[in-house]
Amino acid sequence: MDEFDKYLNPRSIIIWYFVSLLFSILGTYLAYNEPIGSEAWRIWSPAGEDAWIKDAIRAIAITFVSLFFLWNLDVLADWRTAPQNCYPIFRLSAFETMNVVALTILLLILQFTYLRDDFVRNLPLRNYPSLQASPEMYSFEKITLPYIPYSLYAIGVYIGIMLPIILFSLRRFKFDLGIFVQSKKHLENLAHQQQASAEHLTVPRFRQFELAFQNYVILLKNFCERYVPLILGIAIFLIIEQVSGSIDTSTQSAIEITKIFIWIFLGPVLFSFMILIAFGYQTTVKSTEQKLLALIDRIDASPGTGELIGEIINFREKLIWNYSPLAFMVSTVKSASIAIPLLLTLTFYIMQAIIKESNWLYIVFPKEIVQFFKDLY
């Protein structure tokens, strides 16, 4: 158990997500149905009082995407049973706790001010009487009261389901960055040692350097398989939010705030990761190649060094072809952890188009089920 996952209990996290999902579904159900729901809320979506089903489907989809994130971050990798490792959910540092509290307060403030005003401003576009014509239709009970249970939905989705991804991404990146620095430093130290004592270099000692480089490459490949799915997962989430019928239950301002929320927190991590991989790997390959050339120049061309020089030349050839940046990226994309979310991203988009524009689903699924989703979305 390492410093990253010693305070994590996967079963508790699953329970946390399940409870957050239940609260979300309960909140949106109460917001659209009597006695708390109002006609103003039901008229917003073509689904009417069934609009809560759209919100529930969105919350379920986001939950699965979030769990996929956590799986790739190795948060759910170990299912431990030791009592001393079991915590109610997961431990937060003081800084993380402050962020959770601040974001919850900010979410509630936005919910009852900016988002509520945007909702009121766009209601007449949904065939609802204007404020000037019917001010009684904009009373507290009809507009603001449903936001109280709907806050359960917002907190459940954004704080309960989405925020753990951000917290674990930041933790994981900090932890992985430390491992990366150690691995690269070890590789550079070996290269320096072998250059300093080139006249005493042997084949076994050189293979230690080759092994260190292979470990470095494998480490970066693991990083790619861990973080690239996050980018694809964000694509899936944005498709769910903006391409599917779930957009009918959200204001445009809420959608834009969600996008800002995602990129403020995940953007720097993903950007730093891409810089680390794209430039860090290429720089290391070029630096290693130069060190190999310098090493060959320092080795005496004596009968006893022929095998060593051949070993270095073979490794340099592999460095050019097998460890090129292009070969590295191709081998990474072929991994299942990246191929699967890429396939899911395309599937989400294609299925949305099919459900709206084709009837072939009637061949596979019962007509009532297909028609239900067509009417809903």
Image: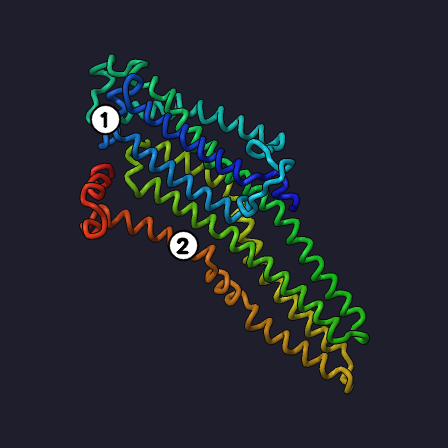
263 vs 220, nearest the viewer: 220
Check disc 1: other Cα within 10 Å, few if <14, some if 14-19, many if 20+.
some
Looking at the rendered structure, the kind of residue marked 1 is Ile
Looking at the rendered structure, the kind of residue marked 2 is Leu
Element at label 1: helix
Which residue position is annotated with label 2? 342
Query: Image quadrant of residue 205?
Result: bottom right
Query: Image quadrant of residue 108?
Result: top left
Decide if residue 327 is on the left or right side of residue 340: right
Mark count: 2
The location of residue 99, given as percent across then percent down, is: 55, 30
Q: Residue at x 24, y 40 (%)?
A: 373
User: Looking at the picture, does residue 228 appear above or below residue 257?
Assistant: below
- The answer for how far apart the CA atoms under marks 1 and 2 are is 36 Å
37 vs 170, nearest the viewer: 37
The location of residue 347, given as percent across then percent down, is: 33, 52
Q: Residue at x 63, y 65 (%)?
A: 214
Query: Image quadrant of residue 301?
Result: bottom right
Q: Residue at x 24, y 12 (%)?
A: 136
Task: Give the farthest residue toward the bottom.
Answer: 303
Element at label 2: helix
Decide if residue 184 is on the left or right side of residue 20: right
The location of residue 67, given as percent across then percent down, is: 46, 43
User: Looking at the picture, does residue 359 appear above or below residue 84?
Assistant: below
User: Looking at the picture, does residue 363 appear above or below residue 171?
Assistant: below
User: Looking at the picture, does residue 190 appear above or below residue 232?
Assistant: below
Check disc 2: other Cα within 10 Å, few if <14, some if 14-19, many if 20+.
some
Which residue position is annotated with label 1? 43
Q: Earlier in the sequence, mark 1 or mark 2?
A: 1
Decide if residue 27 is on the left or right side of residue 196: left
Residue 61, numbered circle: none
